[in-house]
Image (cartoon, rainbow, N blue to C red):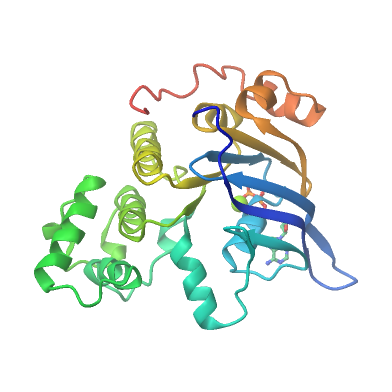
Amino acid sequence: MSNEKAATCLSGKGITKIFGNKKTKTIAVDHVDFEFCKGQVISIVGESGSGKTTITKMILGLTSVTEGEIYFDGKIRDISSHKKKKDYWRGIQAVFQDPFAAFNMFYKIDAVLLDCINMRGGKHLSKEKKTEFMTEACGFVNLKFQELTNKYPFELSGGQMQRLMIARIFLLKPKILIADEPTSMVDACSRATILDMLLKLRDENNMTIVFITHDIGLAYYVSDAVYIMEHGKFVEHGSADEVILNPKETYTKRLISDVPKIYEKWDLTTVG
Ligand SMILES: Nc1ncnc2c1ncn2[C@@H]1O[C@H](COP(=O)(O)OP(=O)(O)OP(=O)(O)O)[C@@H](O)[C@H]1O
Ligand SMILES: [Mg+2]
């Protein structure tokens, strides 16, 4: 990263999510503030149940925000109509923990990818051009388009599905990508490859990546900035070096001590 301060592309003020009613109230996210910069990789790290997925869903507009405001590209986010939501999703996309939940199982692979081309305004393109784009996207994630065109998502392996999700991102080229534990279903080798692909997308398109993980060691390797989440709150944030090499909060220190070999755990030799 250069020393120049990158522009803010997504921020939140006082973001809160309360599930349930008076009797069974869960404060999943509790008045959090954040500011994510263009072209950066930001990790949100916290234990299971700390509110990571909930904040992701609020950012994506998949669940309502109980309190607080989200700002996208300098403006207050407005997703009050179906059209506005669709516009917003042109700029912000996600890859999820469970790729099987991410696809409509009745859509063949080529329909999944065609949808992305259409979303980017490519509806009018010739069939050949569309096939060229889809082939390129599959090539980017080491999948062969010709072998996939007539398949359904459930006919792929978990790892292939995860790569297909990244092929979608390659076509959609969102400004912001949210990756909620995208490597949890694959082995260590594929994990490094998937991270490599995501970081390449960031480098080529100046994409901002918000990376959600339990793993503070992984966060250290991939992030420019780190936010530590405990019981719905961001207890500490800063550059990866500040937060992970000089943690101030006991909770952060504990997360670090849970990863005894922080420097050896991940073989990311292929990650640039
Ligand atoms: N739809 C829901 N209704 C009620 N409570 C919910 C709902 N979704 C999440 N919660 C609660 O909100 C809290 C935060 O959950 P969340 O899924 O955001 O955690 P997380 O940090 O993503 O955990 P993990 O690392 O296990 O994925 C938990 O206490 C959870 O039980
Ligand atoms: Mg989660």
Q: Is residue 144 above or below residue 269?
A: below
Q: In the displayed orientation, state which residue is furthest to the right.
A: 22
Residue 71 lies, in percent from the top left, at: 65, 60
Residue 1 lies, in percent from the top left, at: 49, 29
Looking at the image, residue 135 sits to the left or right of residue 37; the answer is left
Residue 218 lies, in percent from the top left, at: 53, 30
What residue is shown at x 53% (from left), y 82% (from top)? 82
Q: Is residue 204 above or below residue 116?
A: above
What residue is shown at x 66% (from left), y 18% (from top)? 245
What residue is shown at x 52% (from left), y 39% (from top)? 41
Q: Nearer the viewer, residue 20 or 88?
A: 88
Q: Nearer the viewer, residue 22 or 55?
A: 55
Specify the quadrant of the image occupied by residue 22: bottom right
Q: Is residue 267 above or below residue 101?
A: above
Q: Is residue 125 above or below residue 177?
A: below
Does the image show residue 181? no
Q: Nearer the viewer, residue 114 or 21?
A: 114
Does the image show residue 156? yes
Looking at the image, residue 256 sits to the left or right of residue 43; the answer is right
Residue 180 lies, in percent from the top left, at: 53, 50
* Numbered circles on residues, count: 0
Where is the C terminus found, in terms of image quarters? top left
